[in-house]
Amino acid sequence: MNAPQHPALAATDPELAALVEAEERLQGETLRLIPSENYVSAAVLEASGTVLQNKYSEGYPGRRYYEGQQNIDQVETLAVERAKAVFGVEHANVQPYSGSPANLAVYLAFAEPGDTVMGMALPMGGHLTHGWGVSATGTWFRGVQYGVRPGAASEGGGLIDFDEVRDLALKERPKVIFCGGTALPRTIDFAAFGEIAREAGAVLVADIAHIAGLIAGGAHPSPVPHVDVISTTTHKTLRGPRGAMLMAREEHARPLDRAVFPGLQGGPHNQTTAAIAVALHEASQPSFRDYAHAVVANAKALAEALLARGFDLVSGGTDNHLILMDLTPKQVPGKIAAKALDRAGIVVNHNTVPYDPRKPFDPSGIRIGTPSLTSRGLTPEHMDQVAAWIDRGVTAAGSGDEDALRTVRAEVADLMSAYPAPGLPV
């Protein structure tokens, strides 16, 4: 019998230990294509589980409400300085618990309840916290949304309509404009957003949660010269823990810091801060630049292979880590396809596509990405096989062929065994 991977946990709570080990096996055996997921390194995992968990630290380095912060202050300062260096910013706050609280802190810093705010519509690829109605940001503030162009990709369909963005901004005069989103497969033109925000007198926020790692690695243009504030999570393409950061010019430092603490949060999660510091150290290495460019190369190769198999991709392809597939021509709803692919060992998420006639919980599309498979060492040469598996899985979803799904799952597991995932037991 093999020794448990987590002996202390297994001795105290064997039921939970078994679930953790089951998740490790699942992550190791399956092809994870959800673009917001990744594998963190063993070092990031280790930093996430240290005795820093034991310390409470309300406030900021040098200005705490609790004593005994000698080491904690150094940990947080290290994370802040690394964020400033990696992203080339004047100010960074590494305390937000996750992306949504980070975005809420932006509203608290620059808007009053009832003010108009502007972001991309959720069904078009935006995020809930960009002023969408079901979010607190759409309840406490007056949200107005822009979208993407309709029509075929060959005619510019699926791309942000900057004429609409400008007209809406000048008409509504929002206090805050968000650019970025959760299902945008193309390069974000931060300069165009910057010109519009300045003309409208709005604070411009770049939500780079999905592409932070690509920006850090030089595989996507930086928003720094064009925006007032940058919000990001620290997982996804950055390969850090589940946390977040806010970055800005020095003139915005005080309102942002006060919005995070004491405005929204109490003490930071020090173990997460430490893991963010490790991830930022990793992101500063030449190997991370190679990784970021490899993520994009894999996504482009996968998109081409899917197009060759007759799939409809929103905007016709990708410039980053993400591909949004409209399965309407395949006559298979996105949710049914995603469930079938999961049974085939390919983990994706169902997703709305622009101008989707179906409901959000039963949409027409699926969203896939290449951060995780790139972390395992897969290359563009593997992407034709990945596309073939997706094609077989979607076809089997439409016909109900469970044998085909089981066959794909076995093939996926065989390839994954040759490419161990970072941070997982071998």
Image (cartoon, rainbow, N blue to C red):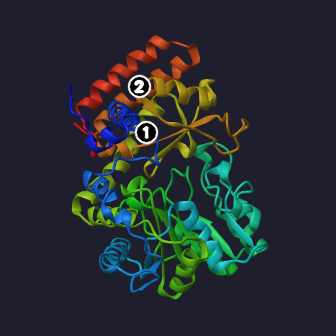
Q: Check whether the beta carbons of the residues at disc 1 and disc 2 lie within 8 A of each other.
A: no
Q: At 37% from the left edge and 57% from the top edge, which residue is drawn?
A: 240
**Residue at image mark 1:** 33
Question: Which of the 4 image quarters holds residue 201?
Answer: bottom right
**Residue at image mark 2:** 389
Instruction: Name above or below for residue 104 compared with residue 242.
Output: below
* Residue 371, numbered circle: none
At label 2, the amino acid type is Trp
Q: How many numbered callouts? A: 2
Disc nearer the start of the sequence (1/2): 1
Locate the N terminus and report the quarter of the image it occupies. Answer: top left
Closer to us: 213 or 328: 213
For the residue labelled by badge 1, is the local secondary structure a helix, a strand or a loop?
loop
Furthest toward the front, the residue is 12
Pinpoint residue 317: horizontal percent, then vertical percent: 49, 44
Mark 1 → mark 2, Cα distance in angstroms: 12 Å
Pinpoint residue 142: horizontal percent, then vertical percent: 77, 67
Classed neighbour count for the residue bearing mark 1: other residues with Cα under 10 Å, few (<14), some (14–19), many (≥20): many
Closer to us: 402 or 214: 402
